[in-house]
Amino acid sequence: MEHPLLSRTTLSMLTLAGLVALPYALPRGAALDRLRLLSPLPSSAVATPAPAAPAPTVGEVAVQETRADDGSSVEPSAPGGALPFQRPAAATAPVLIDGPPPRSIEDPSGHALDPYYAALARAEAKQPGAIARMTYYGDSVIASDWITATLRRKLQARFGDAGHGFILVADAWPGYHHDNIRRSASKGWKVSRVVGPYAPDGLYGLGGVSFVADGPGMYAQVQTMNKGDIGLAVSRIIVTYAEQPGGGRLALKLDDQPAEELSTAAEATRVVRKTLTMPDGPHKLEVRSNGGGPVRVFHLLLERDGPGAVVDAVGIIGCRLRFLDKSDDAHWAEELRARAPDLVAFTYGANESGDGFAFPMDQYEATARAVLKQVRDALPRSACLLVGPLDAADKRGDSYPSRPVIPAMNAIQKKLAAELGCGFFDTWQAMGGHGSMGVWLQKGLGGADLVHPSSMGAEVLGTWVYKALMEGYAKYQASNPAPTSSAASP
């Protein structure tokens, strides 16, 4: 009979204890210093309140110049005091990135993500024109293309690069950034946003922002990358703008070709989508106001003919989930239908964590349900995924307890996902649950504001969501016959 002190369980516990104690036996600054799980966190790490809810004003604010953006993975205006966005090396945090995801996507129906998995299967089978589209809504982490950039890179490495997807015309707020695309814009554009100031007609396009050029000469440029593995080519650009009474002239200049000038004057305001097609390859588009009245533009969509994957990063800094309802209902539904994503994903909670319980949880649940139901009604054949809120903490002496509203919101999102037929990825539990943001800060994965991740943390989160999706996709493949490469894409 095995001696109880020599059981496998006991030996495992002793080994674990030894590994935890090892970093403390080494001098500070040694290679294992970051593994000191029980060390006090930096006293400089203080919580920063989330942006206040928008004032109920109607109008526009001017945006600053969007300087030439080389589309790299460095973003100087990172959200929430997080580190500049620099892609970590492959060996970074291997214990977190390697292996299976810490949580699977919860799906009581077992089929919530089937429409997206079917689109991935068509792209993987190399069906002509097959594109798996993901439209990902969120707050500052998504507005800076964190998490989504990782998803885009990994999905396109496996399924093919079908384009960058959604891009705002200019920087509607500091910190807006997209990886693997080059952007610039003049100053002077005026914006109305779902976070305020509001557009009187509630028209914000797909991304919650309306841009207006009041005079001639204001421009925005977007260009493919000239190096890297993705973002090197485009074959289709869709410009979404408005025709309106008194509208001016909008010029679209592709590469070195003569500009095409469009009149945006009309008897009544309506949204128009202009599709430009071009040979697949490197291209540059300039959107410019040419006078004659105000020009109103919403966003751009960059795609290739496929097969492949696209990830739209539709981030809105300062946004709460309920603010998406600031759009005119019929308009937003039409924008969703026009985009026709196979999967709509949501990550919200950072700004709600600053509101705390001042916004009652029964109202949080009701407004979240209303927004998600709008999406489900507009896109009944698309998949839906809620990526739950990250942990958010407050400093209390040497401890960093979770804000109490985080588990409450997490439970509501999980409940709504099951109720509305969406998948749910429990980010909070994946991070470690109560107090996990403090540990993440200590490990270089959390931002100094104790709300946002660092660049390394965003890479980890994006990798987890990707792996959780691929875990579900493997199960889908096991029970569904693979499509043939010659089959036509729907």
Image: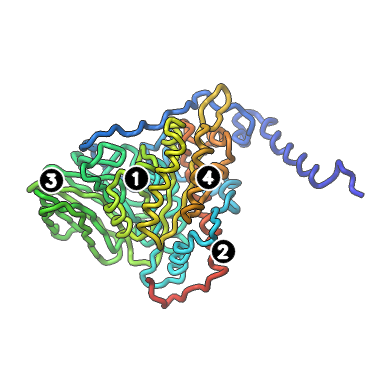
* Pick the front one: 249 or 420: 420
The disc, 4 or 3, on the residue closer to the chain's N-terminal end is 3
Q: Which residue is mark 3?
A: 294
Looking at the picture, how far across and down is residue 18, in whole percent?
A: 74, 37
Would you call the spot at circle 2 few (<14 residues within 10 Å), some (14-19), or many (20 or more)? Answer: few
Going by the numbered disc 4, the residue's amino acid type is: Thr
Q: Gap between marks 2 and 1, in whole Å? A: 33 Å
| Residue bearing mark 4 | 427
Instruction: Name which residue lies at 57% across and 36% down.
Output: 436
Cβ atoms at labels 3 and 1 below 8 Å apart: no
Q: Is residue 63 left or right of residue 88?
A: left
Q: Earlier in the sequence, mark 3 or mark 2?
A: 3
The x, y position of residue 480, in whole percent, is: 53, 71
Q: Is residue 114 above or below residue 193?
A: below
Please tell me in which quadrant of the rendered image residue 230 appears: bottom left
Sequence-wise, the earlier of marks 3 and 1 is 3
Residue 475's tag is 2
How far apart are the two marked residues, 4 and 1, measured between alpha carbons? 21 Å
Within the image, what quadrant is residue 142 found in?
top left
Which amino acid lies under the numbered mark 3 shown in the image of this protein?
A: Pro
Q: Position of residue 214 (x, y in %)?
A: 13, 42
At 37% from the left and 59% from the top, the residue drawn is: 379
All told, the count of numbered labels is 4
Specify the quadrant that holds the C terminus.
bottom left
Relative image position of residue 483 (x, y in whole percent): 47, 74
